[in-house]
Image (cartoon, rainbow, N blue to C red):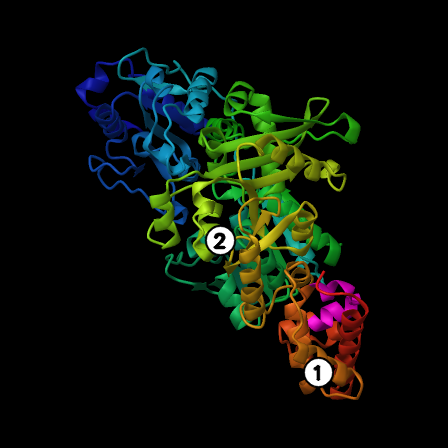
Amino acid sequence: MMSALSGWSRLMQDSKLSNLPALLNELKQARHRQILLLCGSRQWGIAQYKAIINENNALALSNDDQFEHAIWPQHLHQILGQEFQFVCYDGYSGIVPNKLTAVAGTVQAGGLLILLVPELDILKQWCDPALEKWLSEGETSSSSPFLLRFAKFIKQHSIWLISEQSNNHLPKHYTAPATYLNLAPQSNSLASIIQWLSKKTAAPVLLSADRGRGKSTVLGLIAAHYKKQNIVICAQQRRAVQNSFKHLAIELGIQEPSVQQNSLHNLTYMPPDVLLASRPDIDILLIDEAAAIPVPMLKQLLTCCPKVVFASTLVGYEGNGRGYTLRFQSHLQKHYPHYLSLQLEEPIRYANNDPLERQLRVLFALDSDYDAPSTIQPASIQYQSISRADLLNDETLLRQVFALLVLAHYQTSVNDLRQLLDSPSNRLFIATQAELLIGVCLVNIEGNLDATLAAQITLGTRRPAGHMMAQQLAQLQGDTDFITRKGARIVRIAVAPTAQQQGVGQALIGFTMQQLRELVSYFGSSFGAQAKLLRFWQKLGFEAVKLGFKQDKSSGEFAVLVVHQDTPLNISAIRTQFKSQLFFDLPTLYQDLPWQLVYELCHSLPSGELKTTTQSQLTYLASKPATQQQIAPFLYDAIMTQPNILSALTNISQMRLILLLLQRHQPKELVSELKIESKKQLQLVFQQLLSEVYAEITTKKRPN
């Protein structure tokens, strides 16, 4: 395997590295992969890397011109679907956890992930270029807790290390128990899925696995088994399904297609949006990397075909699939209670107990299982503030905090671990019971920028990093107070599943606000708009001030920005503006929002005095039979002027008024929801709505 290594430079031959070829041979026999650190200057590290790989298959991630054919990709999918014996990550280009873990997935069995970094003693104080990614405008940092923890990790886990100035740390031999390629778990899963899909009315299949377990292979083999049926494989990126096409080609004895080719025999690739738009006639739908597709879109994909297989990674560079799995499983349990759930445990791309996989899981806390108390005793819960130093010095606490964030938020990625440790603007507050973590509230301090920069932000000529909420608020009406004063954005609130619906989240946010009240002028948060979630924030005194104009690619939801009503800053004018914007966009941009969400957004908006003409016309129309066309404009005017009228209506009237009047749906589009099947019924519905609204206007003093 390593005959090319006989050509290593004299520098390598004169060092203590003569056993590296033997180590690599032993690593290959064990079907394992390893991290190799090259600690020293960048130029020295590049020379060592070139000598190690010689003419062998390699990939380098670096923004330095000294690397030949190196890449520094902006999008991680650019490096997926490939395998290399040697992969080099240039730490001098910046240690970005998402990139590092993504490229680690391309290392083949018997290969090395080579990481270039400074000497360990320097690493403790070194601030790599990527640190800027976690600093807000106006912040500086002289140290990186993330890199401090990384240096500890290297020493504690006997990482293979070659140093320019100090002793090297390479074992004399690499020994591992003899292993063989065990394809039984994949074969068993394949057989179970085939048997399941052979049923006339098969419920969906949920196939979960960590990376390297062969889930994409299983999808390709499903297509090969049903070679006479029309099958579509769906994923966000074509490259992600190449392995499925490869194994279909192998089984059928035909040539593997290029990544530009979207069809092979009976298997066709389609992105999810194209599939939903075209709705082709298919027999089986295979969805790979389902965790990367918005859950609302996954729900729509369920309607495209009666037989659907969802496959996704549980732990990966792009985010942790555990949160997705829990969220999507709850939907399947409700609507498809007899769905099939399978999980692949045994790796096939490399052997069990692979050092590289194990080391990266520990380094990025991806192996952390959240340990929640079985019962909650609210009286015994304690709330406290946690510093970044606390997290650095208490590995158990750090891993539990990160595990809870992963469990609660399916978009959590490995980058978030560095954010947690290295962002100076972060504030962390936790809830514990008997020293067990049950809640986490992560806050980012924003604003406190000078007046000149604030003015530039309101004009849209500057977008400084790290002040997302402050900038959005300032740009709504050009109010620089939101930039020059400090604000606290509640980034994430996560509560243990066993502690939910017991007031823990509410109490934790209350504690957080109490601790920061003297530091900031206002509190806010931004999250994917859902009726239940918005209701939670409204109960705490937060009010919606903006709804995003684009749906989030991962959740399919519009982001809603909320601000707590207890603030000296002028949010009343922003709320009035938000009301006008929302009502204007409900029939178009927001027409497909769930009506329950529209209700939560509208009913607490500012109210004003009804125009005399509107009130008199409503009085007149309520006294006689009136048509939909006569009623609708004045009913709309009344609701827009006094949105709190919605709260007084019956539930079915709220739904009908929102769908028909505010979102302007046609009755024929929503027959089952509206329960309106004729023009006569529609007329009666509008008369009933008028009756309820008029009764509320005339029996109570308004506005409230």
Indicate the quadrant where residue 185 lies.
top right
Q: Quadrant of the N terminus?
A: top left
Residue at point 78% right, 67% down? Answer: 649
Which residues lie in the magenta part?
A: 644-657
Disc 1 secondary structure class: helix
Horizontal arrangement in the rendering, residue 491 relative to residue 117 (left or right): right
- Which residue is at the far front? 612
Horizontal arrangement in the rendering, residue 203 relative to residue 61 (left or right): right
Residue carrying label 1: 617
Residue at point 18% right, 19% down? Answer: 10
Would you say residue 531 is visible in this rendering? Answer: yes
Would you say residue 246 is visible in this rendering? Answer: no
Q: Which mark is residue 141?
A: none
Residue 44 at x, y percent in the picture: 22, 23
Question: Quick check: is 651 in the magenta stretch?
Answer: yes
Q: Vertical placement of 176 versus 223: above or below?
A: above
131 or 267: nearer the viewer: 131
Report the magenta stretch's main SS: helix
Compare marks 2 and 1 and give the one earlier in the sequence. Answer: 2
Q: Nearer the viewer, mark 2 or mark 1?
A: 1
Residue 408 at x, y percent in the picture: 62, 41
Horizontal arrangement in the rendering, residue 88 relative to residue 654 (left or right): left
Residue 129 at x, y percent in the picture: 32, 33
Q: Amino acid at mark 1?
A: Gln
Question: Quick check: is 460 in the magenta stretch?
Answer: no
The crowding category of the residue bearing disc 1, from other C-alpha atoms within 10 Å (few below 14, some 14 to 19, many at least 20), is some
Disc 2 secondary structure class: helix
Residue carrying label 2: 244
Residue at point 38% right, 46% down? Answer: 454
Q: Vertical placement of 448 versus 145: above or below?
A: below
Q: Amino acid at mark 2?
A: Ser
